[in-house]
Structure formats: structure tokens, C-alpha cells
Image (cartoon, rainbow, N blue to C red):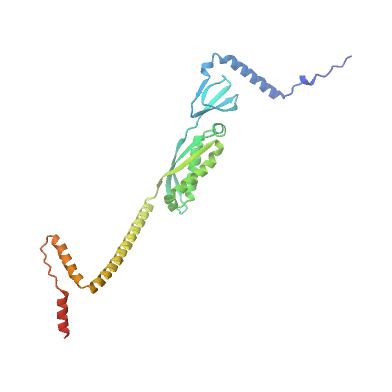
């Protein structure tokens, strides 16, 4: 009675049954696809434009992003998803938020972004455009709640940079790069608009009064200097009379003005004192 020798190690399966089965199926599909490639070749040609990338899946597994150019896919095995790399302009709908100083405002914005990693944009997120829109709306409301009304109106550039930084950090894992965020319009309640109008009008009145007072002060300084000159040189008063008559004569009116010399009045005043 002879004892059977054990099979050599090379005859034993080095892989688990499930892995062997998947390898056999993959090899069969690749061979079948190669057979059908010639008649189905016109239907498997794909053209990727310069501004696009083709993310290719082979039997459900990611093989990478290719393009631009012409590609031939294996029938029933390869699947390609095109991703646009151009900058996308996303209009964020108007969002109602309450600022830090408890003022209700409606704000809308626009977001400019593009895909920098096509594989991440396809594999890690279902719809990157919709996801970016939702995160933009949420971030806009959040930032408005941390900013007071005066900062929102006067420091618009800082608010835009803060929005761009937050949205870019949130979308970076998806292969998205946010290049700019701009707040387009801020809608204020009617009561706030009237209050701001009254404040601006009061500010203009204050400035007008200050300017008028400054003008009066400068005019009084000039008059004081002119009086000192006239006190030293009495003839300047007579010259001033003649200049006034010349200005009145230009008006073509019927008013007649007789200048009265101050010396004559002074003479009568001296006689009364005696």
C-alpha cells in the first residue's frame, strides 16, 4: 500500500477563493471586451477638450484623469466622466441674516471657483456645484452674523476675503479652488434706511455750520486788519466810498448815494463838546 505524496506548493492556490474569482472574471471581461472592440470601436472613441479632463473607471475602479485628446475605451469595462476645469460663476441666492448689532439684512453674493483635482471632484462628492452652493449660503449667513452693519457697509473687502477663505477651506477636500467671493447687494429695512438718511443729513448740517462759523471767524479777522489799516490811513475810507459808488453804478439803478466826509461830522462833534 503506497502513501500518496502531498501536492507541491506551487499547485496550491496562493490567493483566497474570492480574489481568484474576481481575477478570473476581470480577465474574462477584458478578453471579451478585446473581442468586441473592433466592431464597437466607433462607439468607444471619446474626445476630451482642452478645458476638460476625463476621469476613467475600469470595472468600477478609478484609473485616473486623462486629457485633453482622443481616447479609446474598452467596451463594457471602461466608463469615463468628463469634468470641466473652467471657472464657474455661482450666484448665491439672497440670504436673510441678523448682524452682530441685531439688524436684519438680506445679502446676496457671487462665488468664482474651479476644479483643480478632477478625481476628487468625481469620487469624493456627488455634485460639487450644488455642494459649493450650499456651503456658500451657510457661510454667508454665518459671516453676516459675526459682522456689524457699519463693518458690512464700509469694510466690504475684508468681508469678501473672510468669505473666500472659509469657503475655500471647506471645498478643498473636494478638489475645488475658490478664487474670489464678492458680496453684490445688501438690502436694509426701510426704518434703517430712514435712520441712516437722517444721520447723514445731520452730519451734513454739522459740517455746513462748522464751515459757516469758520468763514465768519476768518471774515472778522480780515475786518479787524482792515480797520487797523483805515485807522492809520483815513484816506482809505474815502477810497472805499468811491469803490462802493462804482459798484452801485454798474447796477443801473436809480439810487443816489452822497458820501458824507467823516471829517465834517467830527467838526460838528467837536463844536458840541465846546
Q: Quadrant of the C terminus?
A: bottom left
Q: In this rendering, is residue 147 above or below 61?
A: below
Residue shown at 42%/51% (left/top)? 154
How far from the left and from the top, in percent, is residue 159?
47, 47
Residue shown at 17%/78% (left/top)? 266
Quarter where residue 216 is shown: bottom left
Q: Quadrant of the N terminus?
A: top right
Q: Residue furthest left?
A: 254
Quarter where residue 209 is shown: bottom left
Q: In this rendering, is residue 217 above or below 160?
A: below
- Residue 129 versus residue 159: which sits nearer the camera? 159
From the viewer's perspective, is 109 left or right of 36?
left
Quarter where residue 210 is shown: bottom left
Residue shown at 30%/65% (left/top)? 218
**Residue 228 appearing in the image:** yes
**Residue 94 appearing in the image:** no
How far from the left and from the top, in percent, is residue 153?
42, 50
Counting every numbered tag in the picture gives: 0
- Residue 244 versus residue 123: which sits nearer the camera? 244
Q: Residue furthest bottom?
A: 274
How far from the left and from the top, in percent, is residue 166?
52, 44
Q: In this rendering, is residue 214 above or below 117?
A: below
From the viewer's perspective, is 195 left or right of 23?
left
Residue shown at 68%/21% (left/top)? 21
- Residue 66 versus residue 142: which sits nearer the camera? 66
How far from the left and from the top, in percent, is residue 20?
69, 22
Amino acid at each position: 500500500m503506497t502513501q500518496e505524496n502531498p501536492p507541491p506548493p506551487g499547485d496550491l492556490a496562493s490567493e483566497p477563493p474570492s480574489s481568484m474569482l474576481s481575477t478570473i472574471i476581470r480577465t474574462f471581461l477584458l478578453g471579451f471586451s478585446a473581442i468586441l472592440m473592433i466592431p464597437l470601436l466607433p462607439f468607444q472613441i471619446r474626445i476630451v477638450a482642452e478645458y476638460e479632463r476625463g476621469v476613467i473607471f475600469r470595472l468600477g475602479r478609478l484609473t485616473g484623469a486623462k486629457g485633453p485628446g482622443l481616447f479609446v475605451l474598452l467596451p463594457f469595462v471602461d466608463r469615463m466622466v468628463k469634468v470641466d476645469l473652467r471657472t464657474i460663476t455661482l450666484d448665491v441666492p439672497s440670504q436673510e441674516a441678523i448682524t452682530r448689532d441685531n439688524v436684519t439684512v438680506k445679502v446676496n453674493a457671487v462665488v468664482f471657483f474651479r476644479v483643480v483635482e478632477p478625481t476628487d471632484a468625481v469620487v469624493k462628492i456627488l455634485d460639487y456645484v450644488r455642494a459649493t452652493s450650499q456651503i456658500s449660503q451657510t457661510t454667508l449667513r454665518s459671516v453676516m452674523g459675526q459682522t456689524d452693519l457699519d463693518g458690512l457697509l464700509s469694510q466690504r473687502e475684508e468681508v469678501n476675503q473672510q468669505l473666500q477663505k472659509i469657503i475655500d477651506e471647506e471645498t478643498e477636500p473636494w478638489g475645488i479652488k475658490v478664487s474670489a467671493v464678492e458680496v453684490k447687494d445688501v438690502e436694509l429695512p426701510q426704518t434703517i434706511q430712514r435712520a441712516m438718511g437722517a444721520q447723514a443729513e445731520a452730519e451734513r448740517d454739522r459740517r455746513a455750520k462748522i464751515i459757516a462759523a469758520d468763514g465768519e471767524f476768518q471774515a472778522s479777522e480780515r475786518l479787524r486788519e482792515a480797520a487797523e489799516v483805515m485807522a492809520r490811513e483815513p484816506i482809505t475810507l474815502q477810497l472805499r466810498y468811491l469803490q462802493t459808488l462804482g459798484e452801485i453804478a454798474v447796477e443801473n439803478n436809480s439810487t443816489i448815494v452822497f458820501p458824507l466826509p467823516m471829517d465834517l461830522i467830527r467838526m460838528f462833534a467837536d463844536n458840541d463838546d465846546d
